[in-house]
Image (tube, grey):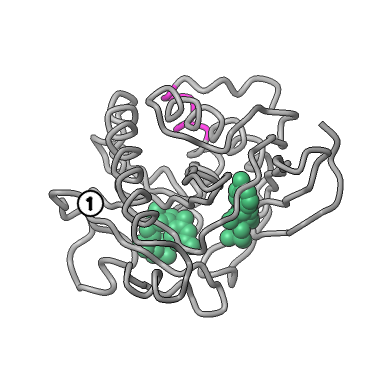
Amino acid sequence: MQKNKLLYTGKAKSVYETDSVDHLILVFRDDTSAFDGKKVEQLARKGRINNRFNAFIMQKLADAGIKTHFERLLTPDEVLVKRLNMIPVECVVRNFAAGSLCRRLGIEEGTPLTPPTFELFYKDDALGDPMVNESIAVSLNWATAEQLAKMQQLTHQVNAVLVPLFDAGGMMLVDFKLEFGLFHHEIVLGDEFSPDGCRLWDKQTRKKLDKDRFRQDLGDVVEAYEEVAQRLGVDLTDL
Ligand code: ADP
Ligand code: UDP
């Protein structure tokens, strides 16, 4: 598949048009950002590891019957995906309290959340990705109530697939963010699932194995991402 015009340069990926109107190529870069793009660094090999990792997870989700944009890996840092009309909200599910939930509510990190929570954030770095709700999303025409209900149901379904997967690798899936879009009027999972957009802790030691290592200057960020991939059996050869 031919890589044509550069459509968009995001914080971690670049998006290219292809020969097919229905497909895009995403290039996973080594750029790593936090705090709505205020902290940025290049972490060698991160893009390739996340590309491989994301392909592995998207395949697991497809096996569970969840529609995703993933088509196929093209090169170590490139993936072919369906071109979605993205809905500008981030869907977050939490199994344990961390990050903004702790800051907002003053609760202790690691507090179990039963059942898992679901939150929506408006995807806008300049505004700091503010929290929104379904009513706002519908009234601003970002999505219909039915589409939002489907996104919530799919996000919980992704959680139900991934919690046991990470558990088998000795990890707690603390929380994660998903993005959805429309492909010929159907809600489809887009973007990526990688340690950049979720929190993973070692079950025994609670060691952080995700982007919090970067946010909190804990070091060994890429090493932790590699460890997560290896624990799940993701093939990282040739990277
Ligand atoms: P950000 O925009 O948050 O900086 P990235 O650097 O990951 O994030 O950029 C990737 C961009 O591509 C995001 O804006 C994401 O919403 C968008 N995107 C992801 N998957 C698709 C897809 N299948 N079709 C269209 N856009 C997509
Ligand atoms: N997240 C993300 N992109 C964002 C905001 C959050 O991938 O723009 C992920 C984040 O990595 C975590 C989950 O969503 O796994 C919940 O994030 P939270 O609301 O706690 O915000 P944070 O404190 O991480 O900014």
Q: Residue 56: x percent and y percent?
A: 52, 27
Residue at the front extreme of this rendering: 185
Q: Relative to residue 69, is residue 206 drawn left or right?
A: left
Residue at the bottom extreme of this rendering: 127
Q: Which of 143 and 80 is in front in this view?
A: 143
What's the residue at 27%, 28% (across, down)? 164
Q: Relative to residue 92, is residue 216 drawn left or right?
A: right
Q: Name the residue under label 1.
A: 96
Relative to residue 233, is residue 202 depicted above or below? below
Q: Is residue 230 within the magenta segment?
A: yes
Quadrant of residue 46 within the rendered picture: top right
Relative to residue 63, is residue 46 depicted above or below? below
What's the residue at 34%, 61% (across, down)? 145
Q: Main secondary structure of the magenta part?
A: helix
Task: Give the magenta range.
Answer: 226-232
Residue at the left extreme of this rendering: 114
Task: Identify which amino acid the numbered label 1 is placed on.
Answer: Phe
Q: Relative to residue 231, is residue 127 drawn left or right?
A: right
What's the residue at 39%, 69% (across, down)? 138
Quadrant containing the N terminus is: top right
Q: Relative to residue 49, is residue 233 drawn left or right?
A: left
Q: Does dot 1 land on a helix, a strand or a loop?
A: strand
Q: Which of 216 and 53 is in front in this view?
A: 53
Q: Residue 158: x percent and y percent?
A: 35, 38
Q: How crowded is mark 1: few (under 14 residues within 10 Å), some or many (20 or more)?
A: many
Asked if one can make out residue 218 in the rendered structure from this viewpoint, the answer is no
Quadrant of residue 119 within the rendered picture: bottom left
Quadrant containing the C terminus is: top right
Ligand 2 shows up in the quarter that is bottom left
Relative to residue 112, is residue 75 depicted above or below? above
Q: Is residue 227 within the magenta segment?
A: yes
